[in-house]
Amino acid sequence: MSSSLHQALGAERGIVCAIGAGGKKTTLFALLEHSQVRTGLTASVFTPPFPDTLNASIHLAELAVLRQQVPTDPASRVAYAVPTDKPRRIGPLHGGDITAMHRDGAFELTLVKADGARMRRIKAPGVQEPKVITGSTVLAISSVLALGRPLDERIAHRPERISEVTGHPLGEPVTPALVAALYLRPGGLSANTGDGPLVPVLNMVDDAPLQRAAREIAAALLDGGSRYDRVVLLSNRRRGHLVEVISR
């Protein structure tokens, strides 16, 4: 059995990558916590260490060691990564290695953090981002807490790139139209995501005004992009995290 969160996000099985800003780790941790199947958690980019509170068996070792340890670990939740010299970071695995670990570890679900955002609320990807796994489901996350805030480095990762993609002036308040444009325009959150399912996720929908704004964004996405068949609204303050699923 899977949770309603897994069903809403299309994260019941296979490899699922989280990209964007404003809640990738918390979303992946929630999926891991509520998973009812053998689940792996890893990253294809540099990322902060797994928290001590993570409800999983944790492996941090060179790839050759991981290939031995992870498949034989009987735990139902297994987090793994490689060490790195970068301070306060653990290292990434290449896509092919994650795919092999998913297979060899007999995971029904593997969760992957596939880009970084430096703790900001919204972002536009760099040229080499994101590092999604071929054939995976991609969760493209943005936080609605960016709405009304000036488009600058305090709330945005690469604000200049966001301005270039959306046409929204730097320093002007972030609007629902800007967030929608991040998903719809070339160079935005759909860039380099492959041809698998792509699910827009609006996070931190913590009250009724934010939910109304999120619904406005969702309507624009469903009207403007044939690739999207639903938009998922989440809140860390909501039991189970799921607020609403808006479909065509």
Image: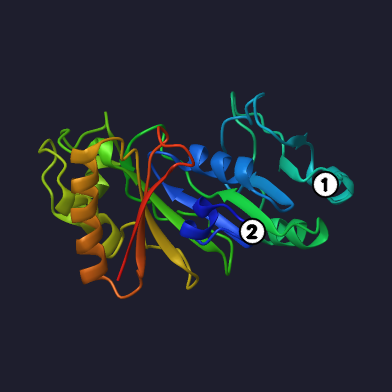
Q: Amino acid at mark 2?
A: Gly
Residue 61 rendering spot, x and y as whole percentages = 79, 37
Q: Is residue 185 visible?
A: no
Residue 247 rendering spot, x and y as whole percentages = 33, 66
The C terminus lies in which quarter of the figure? bottom left
Residue 53 rendering spot, x and y as whole percentages = 65, 25
Q: On the image, numbered disc 2 is attached to which residue?
A: 95
Query: In this view of the protein, which residue sits in the foreground, 167 or 146?
Result: 146
Count numbered badges in the picture.
2
Residue 198 rendering spot, x and y as whole percentages = 43, 64
For disc 1, the neighbor class at 10 Å (few under 14, some 14 to 19, many from 20) is many
Q: Amino acid at mark 1?
A: Val
Residue 62 drawn above or below residue 2: above
Asked if marks 2 and 1 touch (Cβ < 8 Å), the reply is no
Question: Which secondary structure lies at badge 1?
Answer: helix
Disc number placed over residue 70 in the picture, else none: 1
The N terminus lies in which quarter of the figure? bottom right
In this image, 98 relative to 18: left or right?
right
Q: Is residue 47 visible?
A: yes
